[in-house]
Amino acid sequence: MNPRLEAVPTVSSHTVPTQRSDIIPSRKHPNYFGAIINQIQHNNWGVISTRESVLPPMFEDLDIGIAVHDPETGAIVDVNDSLEQLYGYSAAELREMEVGEYTAPSRDFSHKEAVRRIQAVADGTPQEFDWQIERANGDLQWVSVTLKATTIHGQNYVIAEVDEGAGYQDRQQRIQLLHRIVRHNLRNKINVIQGHAELLEAVVEDDASVESVEAILEAAMDVQGISDSVTTLEEIGRTGPTQHTIMDLPRITRSVLDEIRGGYPDADIDVVVESDVRVIADSSVRYALAHAVENAIEHDNEDQPSVTVTVTTDHETDQGVVRVVDEGPPIPDIEIDVLNEDFEPSSTRHGSGVGLPLMQACVSTLGGELSFAENDPRGNVVSIALPRPEPV
């Protein structure tokens, strides 16, 4: 028997109802999560007979995950059965783990960020957000999280409602809608602009008019590139964690570089394989790597751009890593800043392209990390780090 089922309140000024319908509000309740908090507080679930258990046993019947967090450290104090099943860990295991240990490896999802959000709730700011967890079997899963402060038997806690798949499904719907708009509306308009510009190009003669037509065609091609990038985002968005497989990172890297060499015959592209590493990924890794190498070549102002791609293993983080090293001008800080989810663009501060955001989206989908550094004495180092499979 689950030990929490024996954790019946021993001191209470209320009689705890036995029917779930008397305790747990309907999911159709306009303030469902707030109603749960009110039930905890107003029913005076006071002294619990076991030290570990905090949630009343009737919360085991909920079909969504519920977790109780320490408001200062973010540590899990108690969970219900639904959360155990979702994460793949027992309540006892989760109590011994930091949030970062069951969070997908990514710069956007970290132990530090999770604790910051939990502490913000404890300070009076409710939180609702999407999060990506890493289940016990290594699968990555999108969840929607709602955090609120509460008091249970005189102690302050932050309680989390963790709803499986809702955030991921909402993302999918938004991406698919955007893709339809781009595919059917934007592309048609681009074709019209290009067609008329090409007609004008054939008849204009003065230099000013020729320059204007060339500017129109160049802008149309840029917008076409953005359209293609949106299509790529939609394609990688179709895959979920269950479609990730174990892939040979050196083999993928060589394959991508062979394709790129055909389009950039003047570029000097070298590959160095330091370790025969395998990663958990899908076709998104090809998009990310191709964009990293192509960006390095296209932004190099030398007649023969030079790029070195290294495949290695980071044993400290247990990740497979691809590093793309170039000798071109440094990537502007603003282009990297826009990748931060807290960045607020303005008319004067915004990114100029979609290449880096696309790479970030590809890598994040895989639970990986995209990072940037300066090359010595000149150039950039773009690193793509991906999770490795568990050893057999």
Image (cartoon, rainbow, N blue to C red):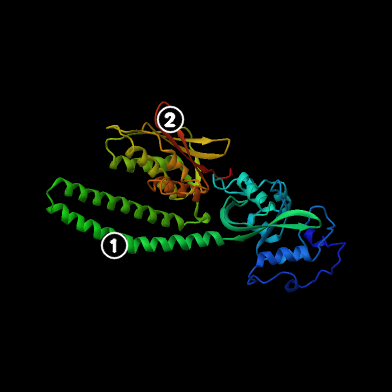
Q: Amino acid at mark 1?
A: Asn
Quadrant where the N terminus sits is: bottom right
Residue 118 x %, y %: 66, 51
Residue 74 x %, y %: 69, 48
Residue 305 x %, y %: 31, 33
First along the sequence among labels 2 and 1: 1
255 vs 178: above or below: above
For mark 1, give the secondary structure: helix
For mark 2, give the secondary structure: loop
Circle number at residue 188: 1
Q: Amino acid at mark 2?
A: Asn
In this picture, residue 181 sits left or right of residue 61: left
Distance between the Cα atoms at labels 2 and 1? 42 Å
Residue 376 x %, y %: 43, 27
Circle 1 residues within 10 Å: few <14, some 14–19, many ≥20: few
Number of marks in the rendered image = 2
- Circle 2 sits on which residue? 375
**At 51% from the left edge and 45% from the top edge, which residue is drawn?**
368
**At 46% from the left edge and 34% from the top edge, which residue is drawn?**
373
Among the 4 quarters of the image, the one containing residue 161? bottom right
**At 12% from the left edge and 53% from the top edge, which residue is drawn?**
203
